[in-house]
Amino acid sequence: MRTLTLDSKNAEKSEDLKTVFRVPIGKYRKIALKYMSLWNSWFNIHEQFNNNVLKYTDHDVEHSITFQNGNYMLSELNEEIEDHYKDKKVPIVFDVHQATSRFVIKLDKGFAVDFREGKLHEILGFESKVYNQPKQRGKYIADISKGIDDIFIHCDLVTSLYNEGTSDILYLFSPLNPPGSMIVINEINPLFEEVNINDYIDSIRMYITDQDDNIIDLNKGRVIYKLVLD
């Protein structure tokens, strides 16, 4: 049995890490994820997603707030709006209706939010229209995670059973940590999967996707794996 540590510190893309060994590490039949650490560093608001601008009107005068690329929860959105207004009373506030998991927008008199352009409304659960009432609830459940509900850890040495088929999934979990925090997995009794090659192992690829098999951009957030081979 052997423990193998892989570190994305110097990798170009930490979410898709390929390690080539100068000397093959041997022949093994099984592999498991013993430990992993990664940062919750993926973005839900980004100019590339066309969802980083909040357009609004103040007594029919058009304005906008541009959010920096990042991973925002409700509190961070409100903080950005507060920073925009500095010491003035904030006329636009987002809240959440806990019972229905809908976002709520609260507006001062004379203000309106225009969601007709861009895709910010999609992750907040609102329709693509103008909201001008003092308090309005989103029509849809907020998708503040931008669709990342589950995280899959893939390994190209693995052929495992998944959804009545085969896959290279080594491990999966649902992220519960807040943005900017470290996620740590430490398995006392790791689950082993069969290694799909009978020859000496000269390379290994580890990559991270969401539940729809989209690779998650970790924005160079460091990932460390500790694998056990038997």
Image (cartoon, rainbow, N blue to C red):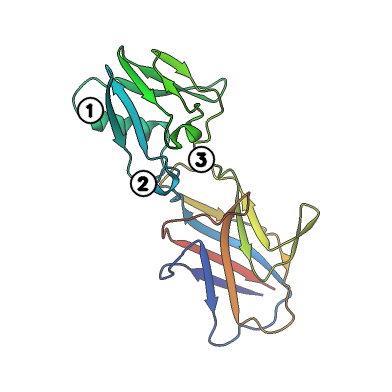
Question: Residue 4 at x, y = what percent?
Answer: 57, 73
Earlier sequence position, callout 3 versus callout 1:
1
Earlier sequence position, callout 2 versus callout 1:
2
Residue type at mark 3 is Ser
Contact between marks 2 and 1 (CB within 8 A): the answer is no
- Other residues around mark 3 within 10 Å, as few (<14) / some (14–19) / many (≥20): some
Residue at disc 1, secondary structure: helix
Residue type at mark 1 is Tyr
- Other residues around mark 1 within 10 Å, as few (<14) / some (14–19) / many (≥20): some
Residue, far bottom: 23
What residue is shown at x 30% (from left), y 34% (from top)? 65
Question: Is 12 or 8 nearer to us in this picture?
Answer: 12
Question: Residue 70 at x, y = what percent?
Answer: 38, 45
Residue type at mark 2 is Asn
Question: Is 113 or 141 nearer to us in this picture?
Answer: 113
Earlier sequence position, callout 2 versus callout 3:
2
- Place residue 132 in its image quadrant: top left
Residue at the disc numbered 3:
145
Question: Is 63 or 162 nearer to us in this picture?
Answer: 63
Residue at the disc numbered 1:
85
What residue is shown at x 51% (from left), y 29% (from top)? 125
Q: Quadrant of the C terminus?
A: bottom right
Contact between marks 2 and 3 (CB within 8 A): the answer is no
Question: Residue 110 at x, y = what percent?
Answer: 30, 13
Residue at disc 2, secondary structure: loop
What residue is shown at x 62% (from left), y 62% (from top)? 154
- Place residue 226 in its image quadrant: bottom right
- Other residues around mark 2 within 10 Å, as few (<14) / some (14–19) / many (≥20): some
**Distance from label 2 to label 1 (Cα)?**
19 Å
Residue at the disc numbered 2:
69
